Every structure is written in structure tokens, then in C-alpha cells.
Amino acid sequence: MDGLQRSHALRLVDNRPGPDVVVRDLTDARTLDRHRDLFRGADAVVHLAFQRPEASDAVAGYLAERGNVDMAFVIYQLALEEGVRRVVVASSNHAADFYEGPLRRRTLELVGTDEPRPLADNFYGWSKEAYEHLGFVYATGALGRPLEVVQIRIGAPRDLATTSFVDDRRNDPLTLHRDLGMWISPRDLTQLTLRAIDAPDLRDRWGVPFQVVYGISGNTRSTWSLANARTVLGYVPRDDSEIVYADEIRRWIVEPQRGAMVSAEARGGLGRRV
């Protein structure tokens, strides 16, 4: 948030109170008129809000995610009606997380933002894909004028040293590889968000001002494409998880693999040791 505040005047909105925060609930699609003042005069909207399910069962999960899709509708519709130029939405890598299986099995090498079609195997990912498709509807201009829309499929914006490398994932090389590929540093996430707000031309190959980009750093192990984030938005990631977490990678990935190779060799796999 600090990076945005240095370059933009912000109007902060949440459903919980905080410093300089306007408290509103934007989940009810029938209450548009109550919130017009939040959008009036704004050049861009960055939508980060999310409503968590109150329970872990499928019905609660579906209903909560339906509420999140309704909230996205409120954002898009009010932005359209109040003359906002652009909406930047926090989507998620989970919009296409069905493909993590093929990536693990190496039957798929790279996930882009155009191909393959985004598919999820959970309600959270489904809702994120719904955000994206709903945003495209508004970007086409079919509802009156084109609303510029950027969807950022955020990866893993957390310190892997205190999560992935200290829980059960540290003994699962494939999951560690995934987390290292999805990581994004705070400064890269700030840069990408600013680029999404300020990029001069979002038009896709159909002339629609709409982009879906992956929100990850320039990670060596990534299997998610940054092509349009770089070429359309001008994103230049500064960080790479391979460098930032080099010590952890050496301890939990390189050394165990080296040990397994040496052990196999000692058993006669590559010749007998004396």
C-alpha cells in the first residue's frame, strides 16, 4: 500500500474500520446507489476485497464465493456508471489451478493467460475465473463504453522461509517447486499493481482493453507465463525466488537429491566405491 500512496491519492474502503478507511459492505448487488460516492471522481479502482466462507462445507463455500462474484459486479457496474477509467482486480493463480496436476506430471510445460482455458477444481478458483470473465464483459463496451480491466492472478505473496520451508511441504520437492515458481516479492507486487494502473494501452488482439496477467516474480522455477505482463504492462520483475531462497533450496532440495544420488552410487548404481 505504501508504494501506491507515494504515487496516487487513495480512497481506502473496507468492511472493517481502520486509519483513513471508509467502512462499507459492497457484497449486496441491490445497493449500488449507496456506494456511488466511493467511485465518483476516481480514475482507477483496485479491487482486493474477499469474503471468506463461514464454514468448510461445499454449500457454505459456494455461497461465499457467489457473494464475491456479486461484489465484483458491484465494482464493475459502479465503475462503469461513474466514469472510472480502469479497474484492477486481484484474481488468483487458483483461477487455473486445475492445471497444477498436469504441471506436476509434466504433461503440461507452461500455463499462460490465454491458453489453456482457465479451469479450477474448487469454488474459490471458480469465483476468480468468474471475476475475470465478468470483467471481460465490461471491457468489451457492450454495456455502454469499454471499461479498462486488468486481472492479476496473484501467486504466493508470502515469505516462503516461514511457510513452505517449515511445514510439510519442505519434504515434497514438487510442491516446493510450485511455491518457488509462484512466489512474488512485495516490491514486485507493488510494481506490477502500479503498471496495471498506469499502462497506457491494454488492448488485446481483439482490440478489447482487457488483460489477465500472472502476479509472480521473475522466478527461475516458474511454469506460469509473464509474457503479457512484460510486453503490455511493462512489468520488469526485480526478484527471483531461486536467489532469495538459495539457502533453503540448498538445504531442502539440492542436498537431499545429492545425498540420494551418492547413496545410489554407493550401492553400485554407477560403480562400486572402495
Image (spheres, helix red, strand yellow):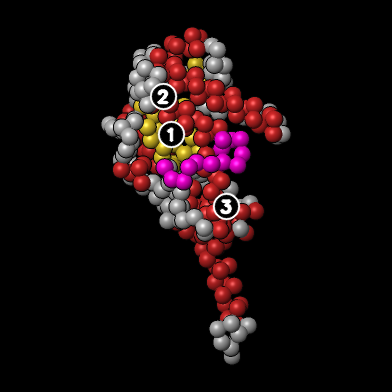
- Magenta stretch holds residue 132: no
Q: Which residue in the structure is indicated by mark 1?
A: 151
Answer whether labels 3 and 2 touch (C-beta < 8 Å). no
At numbered mark 3, what does the secondary structure look like: helix, strand or loop? helix
Q: Is residue 60 left or right of residue 3?
A: right
Q: Give me the residue at 46% from left, 49% from top.
A: 111
- Position of 79 relative to 250 (above/below): above
Disc marking residue 63: none
Q: How crowded is mark 2: few (under 14 residues within 10 Å), some or many (20 or more)?
A: many
**Which residue type carries mark 3?**
Gly
Q: Which residue in the structure is indicated by mark 2?
A: 138
Q: Is residue 85 left or right of residue 105?
A: left
Q: In this view of the protein, which residue sits in the foreground, 63 or 152?
A: 63
- Position of 238 relative to 28 (above/below): below
* Residue bounds of the magenta highlight: 114-126
Q: Give me the residue at 58% from left, 67% from top.
A: 256
Alpha-carbon span between mark 3 and mark 1? 23 Å
Q: Which residue in the structure is indicated by mark 3?
A: 101
Disc with the residue nearer the chain's start (3 vs 2):
3
